[in-house]
Amino acid sequence: MEEPYLAMRREYLMPGCSLEVFRVICSRYIVFPSTEGQFFDYRSLRAFHRTLSIMTSTVVPILFIQILLSIVVTTTLAGPITITRETFRTCRPGTWGGIPSDCCPPKLIKGPIVDFCPTFDASKPLRVRKALQCLSGHELETYTRKLERGYALMRALPDSDPRSFKRQNAIHCAYGTGSFVQDGSTNLTIDIHLNWLFLPWHRMFVYFHERILQKLLGDPEFSLHFWNFDNSVTATPRHGSRGCYFKAGHFVPPMYNDPSKATFEANRSFMTFEPNRPVDIALDLSQLNPLLGPPIFPNNTVEEQTRMNREIMHRSMITLANTTNFIGKAYRVGDARIVNPAAGAGTIELWPHITLHTYIGGWMLQPITAPIDPIFYPFHANMERLWSVWRKLGYGNDDPTDPDWLDATFLFWDENAVMRRVKVRDFLDLNALGYRYEEVNDASWIFFDNSTSSSAP
Ligand code: C2O
């Protein structure tokens, strides 16, 4: 006799997404809709019944003992940092560098939490995030206009809307000031800075920011371009090259420095407004003391500064940057929050990230307020671009394979104000995320020659 349920059988497997694979395994016996709307199938009712009886006689008691054991064990063993409804519920005011913060999102997450599983769609061309310094003419005009409108709309959203400009700052603040407490703990707080969560978490944050802008603009192809601050060399274009090679990017991009634009922010260090002054990413980090405010930056000539920036990039991306040093220190369930930069941050987080936050100053000085300055976003886009560049450099550079990194799980509101559950392992492939970066002159620091510099910064 024909198996009555066989006809209904539909196999469905979305490769490349950790959460989907898990669901397919479960769906062999139980039918339930996936979060993306497709229905999984099951083998047959008979198999289901057989399984049910085996489960009640043997599996259930064993499972029960296992659950008991795991409760005991998880309180003592490591695991990936995981943000849940419970983490939101227990959020409390935090601190950064001795400064108090009060930026918890509402304790109750309304609606479902939907797994976010990016998949590569070969039929769609990748969007390109371009270098701001090379935009010109019509393209620059259109981009500026869109960004103007996007930010006007984002700022106009009420505070109750998690996509509002203010609330996006607040979520970065909550994640970055120890406001979230590890589930099941009373004192172990969570931070996405100064450890190996830094790169993936900020990629996710910028990604959802971009999706919110796309939605507000009604333009799904909109890409948030990046500030190529690490590029301090104006070179002649390579023959036949289509990237941005001919212009240095180490000044604050003009559209972010123009008081008539929505991307302007007055609360920055005076240095950022000095014409033709390249940024300084080579600050001596021992000068950092959040309670004393910004340190004094030296008055370097353009040539000196250029050399120092190239050298610091070379060190941070190559000389000092093996996998552990580059990505940052392991940080899992049971670990205390790291508060000393040198004790946890990867080389890229120290320089150019912390140094440039400090140089820009104002809101950007600390994580409680940094994304209030719109320059935060193109700045962080470049940061994650540099991560991709580092992976391609060779020298055995590769992402960690530790499951506690790969399975670290965060919650972000998406462009429809729906809460999404996002895993690090699903944010490592830019193709799956649907964008790529324009090529720029990374050679400016890749081939920095130490032998020509006398005094290292
Ligand atoms: Cu969460 Cu540049 O900081």
Image: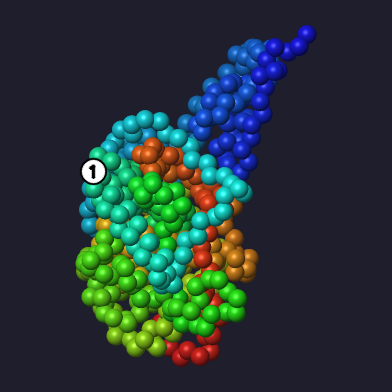
Across and down, in percent, residue 7 comes to: 70, 18
Across and down, in percent, residue 120 comes to: 59, 47
- Does residue 89 lie above or below 444 as drawn? above
- Does residue 97 lie above or below 406 as drawn? below
* Residue 273 in the figure: left or right of residue 416: left
Q: Nearer the viewer, residue 77 or 416?
A: 416
In the rendered image, the residue lying farthest to the top is 1
User: Which residue is at a point 51% across and 76% down the rendered structure image?
Assistant: 245
- Does residue 120 lie above or below 240 as drawn? above
* Residue 301 in the figure: left or right of residue 197: left
Does the closest atom of ligand 1 sit within 8 Å of the Cβ of label 1? no
Quadrant into which the N terminus falls = top right
User: Which residue is at a point 45% across and 40% down the rendered structure image?
Assistant: 421
Label 1, secondary structure: give it.
loop
Q: Is residue 154 visible?
A: yes
User: Which residue is at a point 46% across and 82% down the rendered structure image?
Assistant: 234
* Residue 8 in the figure: left or right of residue 344: right
User: Which residue is at a point 64% across and 21% down the rendered structure image?
Assistant: 42
Quarter where residue 21 is shown: top right
Q: Nearer the viewer, residue 252 or 150?
A: 150
Which residue is the site of mark 1? Answer: 159
Q: Is residue 353 visible?
A: no
The colour mode here is rainbow
Q: Badge 1 local density, few (<14 within 10 Å), some, or many (20+)?
A: few
Quadrant into which the C terminus falls = bottom left
